[in-house]
Image: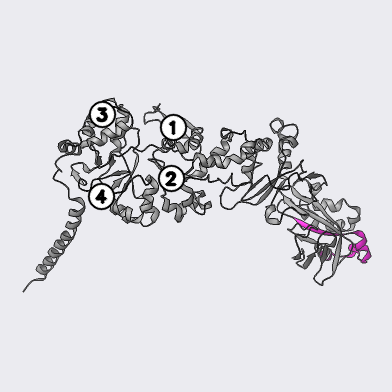
Amino acid sequence: MMTYQRLFGLLISVAISLFLGGCAKNITEYYNPKSTLDKNIIQVLEEDGRFTAFVDAIDRLKLRSTLGEAAIYTCLAPLDEHVQAYFSQLGYSSLDAVPEEELRKFINYHFISGMYYQYNIEQRYLAATTNVGRSRATWYRSRAEGKTPGKPVRFFTPYFFQMQPQDYAGLFGESVEPGGFMVEGARISDTDRDIGASNGVIHVLETPLMVLPRTDEALARDPETSLFSSWQEKHASFVLGEKDEFGWVDTTLYKTYSVGRNLADEQVQSTLLVPTDDAIMAYFEPYLPDLDNTIDSVPQRVMASLIRASQIPNLYFKSDLVSKEDGGLRESRAYVYLVDDISSVITGSVPASNSVIFKTNRLIESAEMNSLEGGIYMKHKVYSQWYWMFERTNLNTGLTDGLSFQHPKKTLLVQPDDVWGFPLAADMLPEEREYRLQQCRTGVLNLDIREDGGFRKRFYATDYGHVLYDDGHFYDYTGHSVQLLTSTPVWERINGAIFEIDGFLTPIDKQDMQWSVYSLIKAVPQFSLFADALDRTGMAAQLQLTGFFTFTVFAPSNAAIQQAGIDLNAMTESELTRFVNRYIIQNRYIFSDGVFNGRIANKNGESMGINGAWETFRISDASGKEIPVVLANAQGNNGVVHQINQLF
């Protein structure tokens, strides 16, 4: 009889045999290393005989020991003819003529840090749980040396070509025919791959592997992106390296960019939507007369804004941009969200080491250029004073949207330079400049006029009071008017439109107590009884509050109170408070322009009706009694006062 221990041991043996049998197929299928594990990578290449030029270059750089013993690598081995072809393409007649720096770049690019058989690369790709994750799983990094970082390098296996075939064409164009196992645009041999060595694995290349340039270098080399590249270079600078542990400064000058992402850093990975030269010219051509008639006159601020709009943090293939499924696109404010059909915009690509660069047939606008703010930048020759104020004050606040997708709606009334007058903005004293800023902001209407049916007779809210539009003129709270010069916009974008006016409107001082609704009532003799009631009830203090507090007051005249036979002096404080609150609506500007019609509560909580506009403007109580407004729209800095000659 078989004992329990013997039975258990037999079952374990069978299980192990089955497991090893199942694994053997994978190991044989995917690894199948040749019997070279007693030799390092350099020794294997040297013994093969097809890689003499590559090994000679390694020896010339004195890297035999380093690459053969010091670390684990995946070697992308180029045949002799590939090495010759690569450097011939760069203009070198022989390997001896190649500078050491160029040779070192080539060698390091063909050594990937870490050991990766084809199976490892495929499993990493398949293990990704999202489409974007699979796209990024293809990236590895070449060997770093000293202070020179390794370059990102992409592998593509049969699974990638099954699941993302169009993405490869989107990266390298139709000229590169994909194979079963690729590294960037180079084909890896189907038979000479997964060659094991004591310090890594070797994949033999069937076609030359070109060392991809950094993003900034790639843009500079492509003739279709020369304008965009020149914009980038206007924002380039060079900085010293960091201090070491002993306090010594690395005096090497490293390139960096002051706008957007640092495309000169191999560690920074990005996706770029770069407009071609033709796309840039098509975008700016209508505005060149308002610049200086040349593309070089585009303000650097505009260039910087459009550079930032072209850059998306992290790596995205074309299918990722089309699907827009990754939350990082929205979090990074990527403007691909503003393009309905990104496939129709992308016309090609520019191979680069640390970015995915797509060329586009149209310029994708930034938040600034897709807003009212962009109109001042683009027409700075006409509105140079506004441009100066935008650059040095907060005049542009609220005229664009930092979130990119929720633009605040505005209408901007601007003064051309010939209306601005003297002194110019740069010559103003600080207090003069602050007042001019407020004058300009009084022309920023807090709605998009296009969504309101165009200009019509009504009061428009601004940051410094309401302005009345009537028959081609705007009137501020003092009665001063300016004329609308352009009935059609001079600039239109997603969040509004710009129109020209022939002067400046008067800003209302939000903190000036002389312009509170209480002060307006107190200043009119025929409101003296109502004003006295406000004093006695304490409402005077409330009606002088500014900032968040606003009021609409239907102030009864002395005649109205006397005609009703009401003795305010005989009332108790609570009765007087109830009387006063009946004619006050809190937190609402109600003008006679008919914008608001309906019911609203007064400070007693009683329902009041607002009906009509201008001459038919009426207020009614809960019983339906209507009272006409005699004098309307006395504007204060915290509300508006209307005179009535009857009581409810």
Q: Which residue is more in the foreground, 237 or 340? A: 340
Q: Please provide percent x and percent y for residue 222.
A: 43, 37
Q: Please provide percent x and percent y for residue 265.
A: 41, 37
Q: Indicate the amino acid at tag 2.
A: Gly
The residues colored magenta run 550-575
Please identify the residue farthest to the bottom as the structure is shown. Answer: 1
- Mark 4 — residue? 118
Q: Are marks 3 and 2 in contact (CB under 8 Å)?
A: no
Which mark, residue 255? 1
Q: Which residue is more in the foreground, 168 or 71? A: 168
Please give the name of the residue rendered at 41% of the width and 37% of the height, measured from the top-left corner.
218
Query: Marks 2 and 4, how far apart in space?
Result: 29 Å
Which mark, residue 61? 3
Please give the name of the residue rendered at 67% of the width and 52% of the height, measured from the top-left corner.
448
Query: Marks 4 and 1, how far apart in space?
Result: 36 Å
- Mark 2 — residue? 348
Give the label, 1 or 2, closer to the camera. 2
Q: Are marks 3 and 1 in contact (CB under 8 Å)?
A: no
Query: Marks 1 and 2, how far apart in space?
Result: 27 Å
Residue 451 visible? The answer is yes
